[in-house]
Image (cartoon, rainbow, N blue to C red):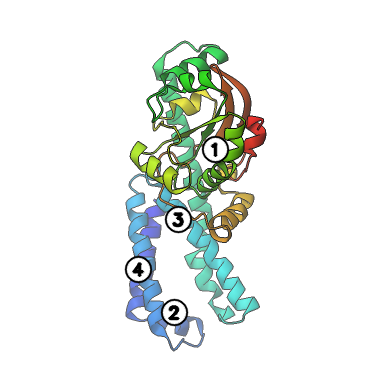
Amino acid sequence: MSLRIAGVYNIAWGAWTVLDPRFPFMLLGVPAPTDAFIWQCLGMVIGVYGLGYWIAGSNPVRHWPIVLVGMLGKVFGPIGFVWTALITREAPIGLWPMLIANDLVWWIPFTLILMHAWRASEAARLSRIAAADVAVPSDSDRIATAMSGATASDGRTLREISDASPTLVVFLRHIGCTFCREAVADLARMKPRLDASKVSIVLVHMSDPARAAAFFDSMGLAGAPHVSDPDRSLYRAFELNRGRLGALFGVRVWIRGIRAGLIDGHGVGRLEGDGFQMPGAFLVHRGGIVRAFRHESASDRPDYCEIAGA
């Protein structure tokens, strides 16, 4: 219901702003801007958000990315307003009622919707595991079986690759993730040291194999074996769980994301796979785990050479 209300509100506010961009200022007793067309453009954007909220209202669990994008806008909007009003003094402070109605009042319902979406997705995952009704093997047996059933892009199984030499298996979140791109760039930079130590690299992802191969090639890891695991069975075998909101969207994650994505230039791409999946890195040999690094935060940046003992 909250998303439907937000949809109607945004569509109405957007249409109102497009038709009469000066009226909100007159209502609040604030001098109207001379560049009204900017507010009309903003009204069109807000109206489009309203359409997205209305669609998301039909199934908030399925359409949680729309809610997340809207939540980010409602967080960064007030930050930008405070900056321009108090620091640069380019925005009239009298617009604060508009800020409350458009952004702040939606923080609680949007946060609750995102938490509900995560819990529902986690409950569905646990239900699928319970429905499988399969006896749980020992850790070593589970890892060995999973590696034997995972075929890499070069035709070998992960078990065969690890039997030939110690292998650094890096589980990525999704190839559009800023931190995933950073991790692949780090691996490309460290590859000469890993090669000198006779440590192989295998990448695990949730994307289409052809798309992933093109991405790895562009990042300097041409020909590196990789495993496509869209159902995340290999992730589960290595005990890589789905992350909580703090591990994925916490303050530290945003700070690191801004640096990795904007300052370091790793950028961001489209979501492919489960956006809540946590990454990890493992040194494996002859079907067993030698060293393990499981991310506690999506922004963790492990030293892959240290994990590999290179």
Residue 23: give x, y in percent of width and height: 41, 82
Foreground residue among 282 and 225: 225
**Which label sits in the foreground, 4 or 1?**
1
Q: Residues within 10 Å of mark 4 (few under 14, many from 20)?
A: some
Residue pointed to by mark 4 = 12
Label 2: which secondary element: helix
Foreground residue among 249 and 268: 268
Residue pointed to by mark 2 = 24
Whole-angstrom CA distance, mark 2 to mark 1, is 41 Å
Mark 4–mark 3 CB contact (< 8 Å): no
Q: Amino acid at mark 4?
A: Ala
Q: Amino acid at mark 3?
A: Val
Label 1: which secondary element: loop
Mark 4–mark 1 CB contact (< 8 Å): no
Q: Is residue 165 visible?
A: yes
**Which label sits in the foreground, 3 or 2?**
3
Residue pointed to by mark 3 = 69
Label 3: which secondary element: helix
Q: Amino acid at mark 1?
A: Gly
Q: How many marks?
A: 4
Whole-angstrom CA distance, mark 4 to mark 2, is 13 Å
Residue shown at the point (38%, 72%) measured from the top left: 43
Whole-angstrom CA distance, mark 3 to mark 2, is 25 Å
